[in-house]
Amino acid sequence: MEFSTRDTLAWRMASLLLRPGHLSPPADVAGVVEWFGAMQAQDVASGLWSLGVRLPGSTVGDVQAALERREALRTWPMRGTVHLVPSRDAHWMLAVLGERALAGAARRREVLGLSEQTADRAVEVLGAALAGGGRFTRDECRQALAEAGVDCAGQLLYHLLWYASQRGVLCIAPHVGTEQTFVLLDEWVPDPHRPERDEALATIALRYFRSHGPTTRQDFAGWTGLTAADARRGIAAAGDALTTVRVEGVEMVMTPELRDAGPPPPADDLWTLPGFDEYLLGFKDRSLMVDREHLSAIVPGGNGVFQSTVVRSGRVVATWKRTVGRKQTVVRVAPLVDLDPAERARVEEAFGPYGHFVGQPLRIDWP
């Protein structure tokens, strides 16, 4: 049986936990992050709202408390980019999905004028300094390295923190106030899950396609950073937990439960999503969700910094930016399509859950 792109978009919105589906949605941070397998989170505020939008009624404090309880953590599991991952899975995700990024570290060190010996020395210094339950801010990491004679000026500090995390020594703990903090991964997660390689590849394949499907093998390989061979190996290892469908001549992968339930009915819904949400970041081919001519507004200059989006019926119709003040948050909406007064009123109403999440009244500004 062949399905349409409209069917695919409806299925994806359910998979991404943005529309009701046939399964009960996860009820907590741990459940949402495990459902996705990993969630892009290099921008902290965006990562928190990606969780909040899928946990109706939650607040930023609720999500921060869950992260403090270690329901999930932030690290660089794949593509050299920060993601939220299930805490017990961080070790194997770094080992299996981080291989290529770690292999490419030598090229980056060459650009920075950093030797492998110095990078390894930095890992040793940070490991020793944090041992016994230590929790350092970025500046405290810099100080520990400087005291040990390790140069961490300019971009060196970021690279060394990334390298130590990519090696599975550090991970990013929740902020303390406005400060990013780091801890030892082995101490933060003392009981890690360590599956064999094929089980690990099958796990990430299942989690990706159940939370993004139906979509292609190419999207899966692009999302994980795996080679095409390992992407195929993961899908094969997942066995009957995944199935294929054809969407207007293109083979896509999804879970049989989602296929058997059929596409959800069309919905004229509105979502206010953060800039680095899996809704767009989870796919290499984003044509189902956004018109090609609007991509430059969503990723200005093609620099990888995604703007927050307003999504109507599964399609991006506007971008937005926020400015947090002491007593209110100002949201500036930039439409990408014509929105009449009634539609603008609906957009403003759709920001209600976000205002509840951040705990401030919102003022919505239009151009």
Image: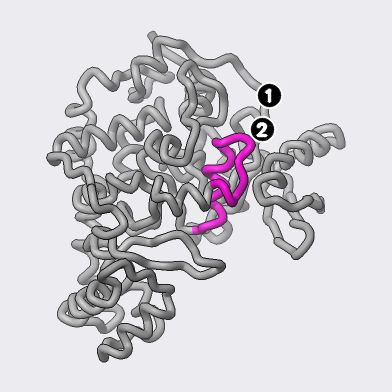
Q: Which residue type does callout 2 highlight?
A: Arg
- Label 2 Cα crowd, 10 Å radius (few <14 / some 14-19 / many 20+): some
**Looking at the picture, does residue 359 appear above or below residue 199?**
below
Seen at 53% across and 47% down, the residue is 63
The residue identified by callout 2 is 312
The residue lying toward the viewer, choosing from 103 and 41, is 41
Q: Is residue 47 visible?
A: no
> Could you say whether the residue bearing mark 1 is in a helix, strand or loop?
loop
Amino acid residing under circle 1: Asp
Q: Position of residue 90 (x, y in %)?
A: 28, 50
Q: Quadrant of the N terminus?
A: top left
Q: Secondary structure at mark 2?
A: strand
Tell me residue 182's x, y (percent): 37, 67
Percent coordinates x, y for residue 122 in the rendering: 24, 78
Q: Dot 1: within a 10 Å radius of its alpha carbon, few (fewer than 14), some, or many (20 or more) residues?
A: few
Question: Quarter of the image holding residue 75?
Answer: bottom left
Q: Residue at x 59, y 39 (%)?
A: 53
54 within the magenta span:
yes
Q: Label 2 vs label 1: CA separation?
A: 7 Å
The residue beneath circle 1 is: 268
Kindly check if marks 2 and 1 are in contact, taking CB atoms under 8 A apart as contact. yes
Q: Is residue 334 magenta?
A: no
Question: Between residues 74 and 338, which one lies in front from this camera angle?
Answer: 74
Left or right, 122 with reference to 261:
left
The magenta-colored residue range is: 43-62
